[in-house]
Image (tube, rainbow, N blue to C red):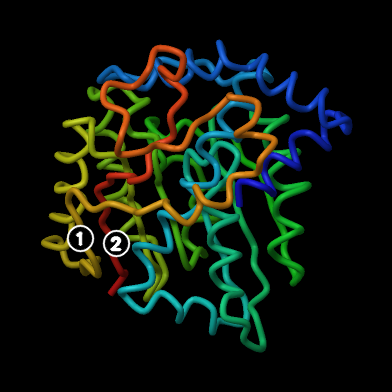
């Protein structure tokens, strides 16, 4: 996956010469460090509008974040989603949509016939124009050749949803609804409203639809939110299909496939067990092998 992203970024920028590629990637080191450091506080405060920030996000986080959804779906028989003739997916706060890329690659592996037609709805409050040009225009075609339609929508997930008819029409027809890795970027005072939104959503979802919430473990309010989502099963509309605290995804296979142009540029380094503390020149540039996360999957009954 890293190679698809790196090649997609460089192709979109029109940088074909190997030395120019290495030099360009190396020039992103300050922005990559700044992006990483922005995630080291309890409340993330990062602007994704600059193109170079979106590029750094793609290069560092897109590949591993594309894997988390399948970690939740596989143990609960999520493959049944692939047996539907049409699969409608809504991704909330999705940015450049790593969840969609991972989901499509997962649906097609191992190959089965027929594959569903996929209708994807991408919701976010930010402008991810450059990143989506790469992820949707260059990465997705390499992993999915079946019928696919994509619609982008503007949505602040912390605002009330129940007074937005267009949003209700989309969510109430979705087989899979995902909220991944964005809670830590929303003020905790808004978590009550988001939970209320999910409570409302539980009454509008179609039967057997799945609601999946995934987020990183280092932010304590996230765990409380995940636990409260699970408690929605007490209200009778949802049943908990899977619940995980402090789970982790081993990204070792992804690390092994990191392309040479990325590693040779010294923009990013693989995590090793032998560097503690991390040398100063690698500070903020080491990609962790294990991704810790909390997750809950709720099925409409």
Residue 97 shows in the view: yes
Does 260 appear above or below 177? above
Residue 44, horizontal then vertical, whole percent: 36, 20
Percent position (x, y) of residue 40?
31, 19
Give SS at disc 1.
strand
N-term-proximal mark, 2 vs 1: 1
**In the orientation shown, which residue stands out farthest toward the bottom?**
113
> Disc 1 marks which residue?
243
Where 74 falls versus 103 (above or below)? Answer: below
What residue is shown at x 54% (from left), y 68% (from top)? 106
Q: Helix, strand, or loop for circle 2?
A: strand
Numbered mark located on residue 272 in the image: none
Looking at the image, residue 178 lies above or below residue 60? below
Q: Give the image quarter of residue 233.
A: bottom left
Picture residue at 40% right of the left edge, 69% below the top: 209
Closer-to-camera residue (85/278)? 278
- Residue identified by numbered label 2: 297
Gap between marks 2 and 1, in whole Å?
Answer: 6 Å
The residue sitting at 67% across, 14% down in the picture is 27
Label 1 neighbourhood size at 10 Å, few (<14), some (14-19), many (20+)? some
Disc 2 + disc 1, Cβ < 8 Å: yes
Q: Residue at x 48, y 19 (%)?
A: 35
Give 182 or 260, whichever is nearer the viewer.
260
Q: Quadrant of residue 301?
A: bottom left
Q: Is residue 100 left or right of residue 36?
A: right
């Amino acid at each position: 996956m890293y190679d698809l992203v790196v090649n997609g970024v460089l192709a979109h920028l029109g940088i074909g010469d190997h030395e120019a590629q290495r030099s360009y990637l190396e020039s992103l080191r300050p922005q990559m460090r700044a992006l990483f450091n922005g995630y080291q506080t309890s409340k993330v405060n990062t602007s994704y509008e600059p193109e170079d920030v979106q590029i750094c996000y793609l290069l560092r986080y897109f590949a591993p974040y594309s894997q988390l959804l399948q970690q939740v779906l596989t143990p609960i028989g999520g493959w049944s989603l692939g047996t539907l003739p049409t699969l409608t997916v809504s991704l909330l706060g999705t940015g450049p949509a790593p969840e969609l890329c991972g989901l499509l690659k997962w649906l097609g592996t191992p190959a089965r016939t027929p594959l569903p037609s996929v209708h994807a709805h991408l919701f976010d409050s930010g402008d991810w124009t450059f990143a989506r040009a790469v992820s949707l225009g260059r990465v997705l075609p390499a992993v999915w050749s079946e019928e696919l339609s994509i619609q982008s929508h503007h949505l602040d997930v912390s605002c009330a949803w129940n007074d937005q008819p267009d949003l209700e029409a989309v969510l109430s027809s979705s087989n899979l609804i995902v909220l991944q890795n964005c809670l830590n970027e929303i003020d905790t005072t808004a978590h009550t409203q988001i939970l209320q939104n999910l409570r409302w959503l539980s009454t509008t979802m179609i039967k057997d639809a799945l609601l999946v919430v995934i987020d990183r473990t280092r932010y304590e309010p996230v765990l409380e939110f995940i636990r409260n989502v699970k408690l929605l099963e007490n209200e009778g509309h949802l049943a908990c299909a899977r619940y995980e605290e402090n789970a982790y995804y081993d990204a070792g296979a992804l690390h092994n496939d990191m392309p040479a142009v990325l590693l040779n540029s010294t923009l990013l380094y693989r995590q090793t067990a032998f560097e503690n503390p991390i040398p100063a020149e690698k500070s903020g540039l080491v990609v962790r092998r294990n991704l810790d996360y909390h997750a809950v999957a709720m099925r409409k009954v």
